[in-house]
Image (cartoon, rainbow, N blue to C red):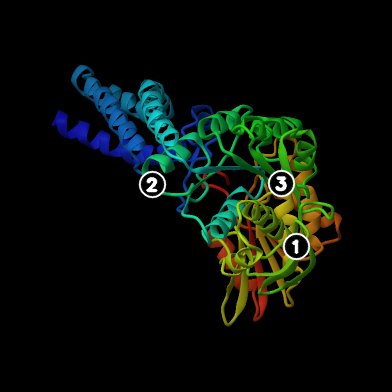
Amino acid sequence: MIYFCICICEVLFVLLSYYFVKTYQLDGYNIKKFLSHAIEFKLAFGKKNKLVFTRRMIRFYILLFIISSALFSLIMFFVANPLLRALDCVLIYLFISILISLCHYLLLPIEILIQKFYVEIARRKLAKIDIIKIGITGSFGKTSTKNILTAILEKQYKVCSTPKNYNTLMGITKTIVYDLDDHDVFIAEMGARHKGDIENLAKFVRPQYGIITSIGPMHLETFKNLKTIEETKNELPMNLAENGIMVFNGDSPSSKKLFDRFVGNKYLTCSSDAFAYAKNIDYGINGASFDMVIDGHCKRIQTKLLGKFNIDNIVTAGALGYLLNISLEDIASAVKSLAPPKHRLEIIRNNYCTILDDSYNSNEIGFSQALEVLGKFKGLKIVVTPGIIELGSAQSKVNFTIGGLIADVADYIIIMNDENKNYLLSGAIAHNFPRDKIFFASNRAKQQEILERLMMKDCVVLFENDLPDNYK
């Protein structure tokens, strides 16, 4: 009977702990962030993200299972009173987040050793091969620029690039260990949440070429201010291989500032006096066309990608491709064949309406440019968004501004979370947007219900940003 009770308690524990553990994984195994979400009960209850049983997560769950089973066994064998037994078991359920923290710290030394082991394997592998190494960083456009550059360089080289948005030390390490083989070029996207992150990645890869895309107020909860972000992104040019070459997106004031500071080999893009820039830009519902000028040479470019930020990414990637001996004709051919990345201002059409899916993530510049694209369409316009997060003290101001920009373009607004709803609402109303055309949806089912009421034939719906399940 005791063993049966232990099994029942353990099954309940596994079921109850699922959303806590999923939140812990979504928080990047950051225990402080997880505890903050656990205390506020911002758990990953939604269905968008599922718990991924990586090797690390399997190790974690085995330890959590062992500790919880041991606690339930102690209670069943040493506590005789049934009411006390039940109370003690309830206490274990209530302190799930504490047990997760305990497992985190118990496994931390092992995880660090495993990481060091794989990092050393990757470091030795990189040291043994003769390959062109490229690092890409910035606040916005890293992944898109990496994908565009990969397509351009594949016209002449065999290219290995970090997949998706793998931009951490372990993401880059994993790519080197498992994917890098007999390639000519390795492209590493480099992300950061803290000062020193890019320096560590650049010293690890030691790229001969680097790109800094647009820089802006992202992850202000950890960076605190734009100056710290600039200093962090500047860690890439400061740690290039000897005689390395940097390309900077000059349309971004912060990136231009870093260009001016850098004393090595450097090229500026996206301004009229730059090494590479775009002119005669023409937008349409099927994409964009423009004249790309590189080193005084001009080529008309056609692309399915929408938005000025994508044109900047194409020009910046094209400049580095040109420096690596890719012809303008091959650059144009590569760009023309590019499909819009999933959930990054992707056009989805059917016989009833048009969807602009920009739900991957969002920032102030990207949001405003997505609204600019939305404005090019005819018909009823609906914007569905939770606003922008992780902006620290600037969050209220930015989302208030965004609310006003939405009001200037949209006919209806559906706000998808509590965190920014008051800022977006007040910003829209400040631009004289009718209050009865603003709706709130706490979940996707409610969102769908509202959309079905509002949508009509030939309407256009912009989905901008999509928060993790642990944001409501």
Q: In this rendering, is residue 325 above or below 52?
A: below
Q: Residue at x 63, y 62 (%)?
A: 327
**Residue at image mark 2:** 181
Image quadrant of residue 310? bottom right
Instruction: Locate residue 272 relative to residue 79 in the image: left or right.
Output: right
The reply to whether the C-beta atoms of the residues labelled 1 and 2 are less than 8 Å apart is no
Q: Earlier in the sequence, mark 3 or mark 1?
A: 3
Q: What's under tag 1, amino acid-wise?
A: His
Q: Residue at x 62, y 50 (%)?
A: 417
Q: Position of residue 196 (x, y in %)?
A: 61, 27
Q: What's under tag 2, amino acid-wise?
A: Asp
Q: What's under tag 3, amino acid-wise?
A: Ser
Q: Position of residue 19 (x, y in %)?
A: 42, 41
Question: Which label belongs to residue 50?
Answer: none
Question: Which label belongs to residue 214?
Answer: 3
**Circle 3: element type:** loop
Q: Between residue 64 and residue 283, name the one nearer to us.
A: 283
Report, in whole angstroms, how far the alpha carbon at label 3 lies from the one at label 1.
24 Å
- Classify 10 Å Cα crowding around label 3: few (below 14), some (14-19), many (20 and above): many
Q: Earlier in the sequence, mark 1 or mark 2?
A: 2
Q: Residue at x 37, y 37 (%)?
A: 17
**Residue at image mark 1:** 297
